[in-house]
Image: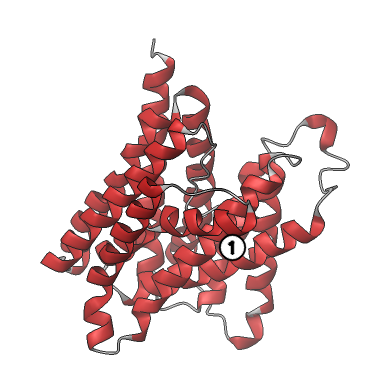
Amino acid sequence: MLSKNQLGFLYMFLSVCAFSIMDIIVKWSDNYPLGQVIFFRGFFGIVFYYFVIPRKRIKDFYLTKRPLLHLSRCFFGLAALLSIFTALRNLPLATVVSISFAAPIFTTIFSIFFLNEKVGYFRWLAVLIGFIGVIIISEPGLSSLNVYYIFPVIFVLGMSYVAISIRQLSSTEPVWLISLFFSVTITIAGILSIPFGWLMPSLMDLIFLSMIGLFGGVANLWLSQSYKFSEVSLVTPLKYLALVFAICFGYFIWEEIPSTKTLIGAALVIASSIIIFRREVVLKKELVASRHD
């Protein structure tokens, strides 16, 4: 029988694996229009929320006290999702994953403006370290004017706002409703992209595209379960296994070899995230850590 902390570790590990597999399929799907992939991410992600909606809320599950905040959360979440999918299709897997770890850096900055939080010297130091790491990782793109390096940065900015908005929403709204509204939003956005071109997938491709939503949905559930069973401070470091997976999958599937600059920048970004995370734990603040929610 596993202890609660062991269950937390298991769920976090499964979550990281599911997100990594989803990233691989997104990168593989570059023959299909982006809107079509977004649709599959949203539609098949909705499946899981059916099982977590309380029975007493089946008839009025859509009711909310804060529609405008939901709307802004969904808008920035959609922008972030479009950006990360575009980046995954056009940049090395390890590069995209490395920059995505910078989300806590911008969340810290945004918390000053949206939550009126005070940021101390340690977290400002972490922000500076993280910025240096992002610049080091992105430098090849800046020097060669590779526009695709801007997309993981847009993703980080979008997800940072999403983290702040979810922190605000969670004070009055159930987590499943926040996630459900987002999945419905990206499903609708995908449907609206039909006039811009969709491709009829083969049966095998249809299965893979569906797996984007299924893995994304189950990964978020496993992430929530991890934080439910174990202390956040114990399981969050497992998230950085995603970089190991990205390096391995990128090498064996696409023959991508991360540069020394990418590895150094990733180390700085991860270090800054850990510093911010540890200060959050000390200050007893709730962290919102879902990458694709």
Q: Residue furthest right?
A: 59
In the rendered image of this protein, does residue 174 appear above or below residue 69? Answer: above
Residue 210 at least partly seen: no
**Is 281 situated left or right of 60 in this image?**
left
**Is 243 situated left or right of 27 in this image?**
left
Helix or strand or loop: what does disc 1 sit on? helix
Coordinates of residue 224 in the picture (x, y in percent)? 53, 36
Q: Which residue is mark 1?
A: 77
Q: Nearer the viewer, residue 231 or 220?
A: 231
In the rendered image of this protein, does residue 270 appear above or below residue 190? Answer: above
**Is 24 situated left or right of 37 in this image?**
left
The structure residue drawn at horizontal position 50% and vertical position 48%, both measured from the top left corner, is 290
Q: Residue furthest bottom?
A: 145
**Is 133 situated left or right of 227 in this image?**
left
Q: Residue furthest top?
A: 1
The structure residue drawn at horizontal position 36% and vertical position 85%, both measured from the top left corner, is 147
Coordinates of residue 215 in the picture (x, y in percent)? 47, 49
Report the quarter where the N terminus lies.
Answer: top left
Q: How many marks?
A: 1
Coordinates of residue 287 in the picture (x, y in percent)? 51, 41
In the rendered image of this protein, does residue 112 appear above or below residue 137? Answer: above
Check disc 1 and give the amino acid type: Gly
Instruction: Indicate the quadrant where residue 152 lies.
Output: bottom left
The residue carrying pointer 1 sits among few (fewer than 14), some (14 to 19) or many (20 or more) residues within 10 Å by Cα, namely many
Q: Nearer the viewer, residue 291 or 48?
A: 291
Q: Residue furthest left?
A: 260
Residue 3 at least partly seen: yes
Instruction: Indicate the quadrant where residue 251 lies.
Output: bottom left
Q: Nearer the viewer, residue 21 or 132?
A: 132
In the rendered image of this protein, does residue 228 appear above or below residue 194? Answer: above
Q: Nearer the viewer, residue 104 or 204?
A: 104
Coordinates of residue 236 in the picture (x, y in percent)? 38, 37
